[in-house]
Amino acid sequence: MEDDINMRKSLQIAMADFKEFEVTTFKNAVDALKVLDDSFELVITDINMPKMDGIEFIKALEGRYDVIIMTGNATLQRAIESIHLGVKDFLLKPFEVDTLIDAIKRVAKMAQIIKKTKQTEPKLNNADTFIATSAKLLKVINIANKVSKTDVSILLQGESGVGKEVFATYIHQHSNRKNKPMISLNMAAIPDNLIESELFGYEKGAFTDAVDKKPGEFEKANGGTLFLDEIAEMPYAVQAKLLRALQEKEIRPLGSSKPIKIDVRIVSATNANLVQKIQNGEFREDLYYRLNTIPLNIPPLRERTEEILPIAKHILEKNCKEYKLGEKIFSQEAQADLLAYKWPGNIRELISVVQRAAILSETNIITADSLYLHNRGL
Ligand SMILES: Nc1ncnc2c1ncn2[C@@H]1O[C@H](COP(=O)(O)OP(=O)(O)O)[C@@H](O)[C@H]1O
Ligand SMILES: [Mg+2]
């Protein structure tokens, strides 16, 4: 990867003579992170690059590839500091192609000796609706890719509207359970006294209204994924039962004496501070540790502003098509306002602002005024 186009092109041409290598070039790290999968073995990167610098990029690769750095004198010192990130070789610019080829061969030989077994890294599948360009979000995706194939519990944390449910679905679709159901249950949407029977089901006659037996969501999710949204809202008494179910890998429907074996992967989500809830005695610490094997923190939209305009434009286009509004675009001021606004409701709020503006604007240019962000504290 090299941001200088001439350098990039000449490297690609030179490398083409060496048939044993298949080469893909990228002009920036963000693009590369979206495409890199386990068909790649070696990454050759510059350090000084726009958008995301080489060191950040190497960190985001998390050791999945061998890395060779090519750098100018000024950044060599920094490059060398990156040795603990597993960088295999450094090339000082300018260098001969032969020098690069030698370095590649050396690294390839090392790789053969080490013979790492690599995990498959799924790519984003519906990349057109799930927009990820910021380093922060790509980092989360990277971790999600690593853990989705395992059965560990994942706790998604982040403000409302940041995409927790999107991530839960992503994890399920990239897991070995993808052909089995993913069941979503929102603890905040179910009355407290019904949560237990929703989760575990009941037998006929278990209580007055139980005229027939009903399987719980755990049973429906068997073999698949159970997504427990707004987990902080789960009543304290039910928390103990959930913990027991997870530990014993079996559930007991209300009114039943026969336990049912279950094999369910739990992904839960919250926008609350669970540690605070534990201190207040509202959330069980033992359950927290059980659910939080892998914490995934999804940053708020205002901390990944790179995504604001791509998402806004995508939503605008989608709405214009859906409602047959013709083609519309954002004015420069509108774009500046979208970027400056703090988005307390995150992507969900962005979607509704853009949708309303798309429908209400009289012309094909969405002005800053038609976003109404100034009424919302811009
Ligand atoms: N990276 C993204 N790109 C495009 N749309 C997104 C992205 N993340 C979330 N969304 C959309 O934003 C809305 C809120 O996402 P959701 O997962 O429900 O958030 P949360 O569960 O954190 O409240 C949904 O309509 C979702 O499709
Ligand atoms: Mg949600």
Image (spheres, rainbow, N blue to C red):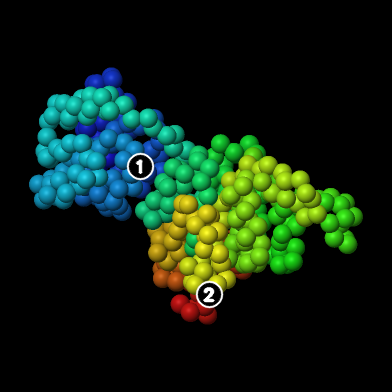
Q: Is residue 367 visible?
A: no
| Residue type, label 1 | Ala
Residue density around tag 2, few if under 14, some if 14–19, many if 20 or more, within 10 Å: few
Q: Image check: 204 left or right of 121?
A: right
Task: Report the residue at 75% width, 51% height from top.
Answer: 253
Task: Report the residue at 51% width, 69% height from top.
Answer: 278
Residue 182 at what x, y percent from top left?
A: 64, 46
Q: Image check: 46 left or right of 298?
A: left
Q: Is residue 340 above or below residue 351?
A: below
Q: Which mark is residue 344?
A: none
Residue 131 at what x, y percent from top left?
A: 48, 51
Is the distance from the Cβ of mark 2 to the nearest ligand 2 atom less than 8 Å?
no
The residue furthest front is 257
Question: Between 172 and 191, which is closer to the camera in this rendering?
Answer: 191
Task: Report the residue at 16% width, 26% height from top.
Answer: 102
Q: Which mark is residue 280?
A: 2
Residue 133 at what x, y percent from top left?
A: 41, 52
| Residue type, label 2 | Asn
Task: Report the residue at 25% width, 49% height from top.
Answer: 55
Q: Is residue 342 above or below residue 171?
A: below
Q: Is label 1 or label 2 in front?
A: 2
